[in-house]
Image (cartoon, rainbow, N blue to C red):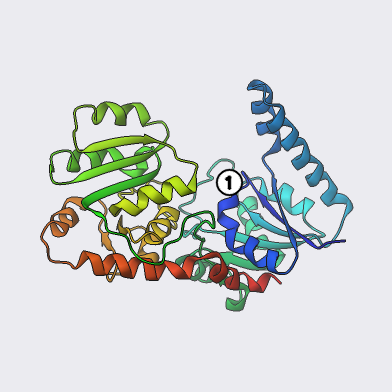
Amino acid sequence: MKETFYILHKSGADSHYIGLKHLLNTKNIDLKYREFSVFSKMIKAITKLSPYQFSKQLTNLTFLISLLFSKEKKIVLGIAPYDNKLPILLYLLKEHKVYYHTSWTHWDDIKYPKRKKVTTKLLSQWKLFLEEKVTHHFVVTTTTKNRLLKNYQIEGNKISVVNHSVDESFNILEKAPIKLPFSFIYIGRLVPEKGILETIELLKNLEEATFTIVGDGPLKAKIQEAISSCNNIIFKEYIKDKRKLSELLSTHQFLLSNSIRTQKWEELFGMTIIEAMAHGTIPVASDHPGPIEIIHSDFGFIFPEGELIDVINKLSSNKYDLNLMSTKALEASQQYLPNQIAKKWEMIL
């Protein structure tokens, strides 16, 4: 029987495992995705009359039950810090080989996204999981590794830093294309913490600048209203086709990531940053953990949160060789290609 690895995640997150998939393909090993938030999604599937989603959750439920009657499955678990579902999962996974995958940077029991039903007992179960149950930790940034080591008794050689990867379906370029001068693009969720409305306020009066917003989310209507009278800002619906997204990225000089921290969230990596770099688009991002590790001053700009205008003023000063920075961004993106990230997953074998 062909060997199989499983991703067990709240919502699948296929894009987080491009490098792992590439590695396992070269070894003729299957990779299957399963989800553990089954019942809430079943109810949603029934409410929305979605046979596909209901069938998918039946598959997930069958998998979870099968864990009780099998041994030694190799499972990459993606679960948010201090999530109260962990004890149930630990029971199901007790006879299996578990690898933990996380991008979260705060491991001091103070700042974390899942705050409901967190008890002293739950924290001790998480400690047991992190220190004893996990075969190997795969973390997205060095910051995550360092903070896990600081707060838990984990051997350093049991943690590997494995960044996310550029999607293979992108049209990866060999040479940085010529860009529309002073053109900015944002790609992603349309939510307050992404700072898009603030970015619009800064750019709408800069006639020499153009700004393209691509995505979907709760702020969509507000954004469309905010730019209704702007000649230099355009909105595009979420683009699923990576080839079309490639074409769009290739024409823009800068990617903007004006992220704003909340109690539950900060930019932990930045998939669109490495995707933009792969098209020679220069990343401009606020100083969150992910962007700080990705972006170097040779090919991008990091600014203190709330100070985007200072960077924009710098960009308009003709102080920088932007063509050279574009080329260097493209060169730096090569380390995030699937074949390179695959090497960092090797410890899983």
Instruction: Give coordinates of residue 223: x percent, y percent.
Output: 30, 31
Name the residue located 12 percent from the left edge and 62 percent from the top edge. Answer: 318
Instruction: Please say whether residue 264 is visible from this viewpoint.
Output: no
Give the residue drawn at x 59%, y 49%: 13
The single residue placed furthest to the left in the displayed view is 317
Q: Looking at the image, can residue 240 be seen?
A: yes
Q: Residue at x 28, y 71 (%)?
A: 298
Compared with 112, 235 (above or below) is above
SS label for mark 1: loop
> Which image quadrant: the N terminus?
bottom right
**Which one is nearer the viewer's eye here, 337 or 223?**
337
Q: What residue is disc 1 on? A: 118
User: Seen in the image, is 46 located left or right of residue 251?
Assistant: right
Q: Is residue 258 above or below residue 133?
A: above
Q: Is residue 19 left or right of residue 240?
A: right
- Quarter of the picture holding the C terminus: bottom right
Q: Residue 332: where, in percent of width, then height?
A: 39, 70
Q: Is residue 220 left or right of residue 100?
A: left
Amino acid type assigned to the residue bearing label 1 in the image: Val
Tally the numbered discs. Answer: 1
> Residue 125's spot in the image, x, y percent?
67, 56
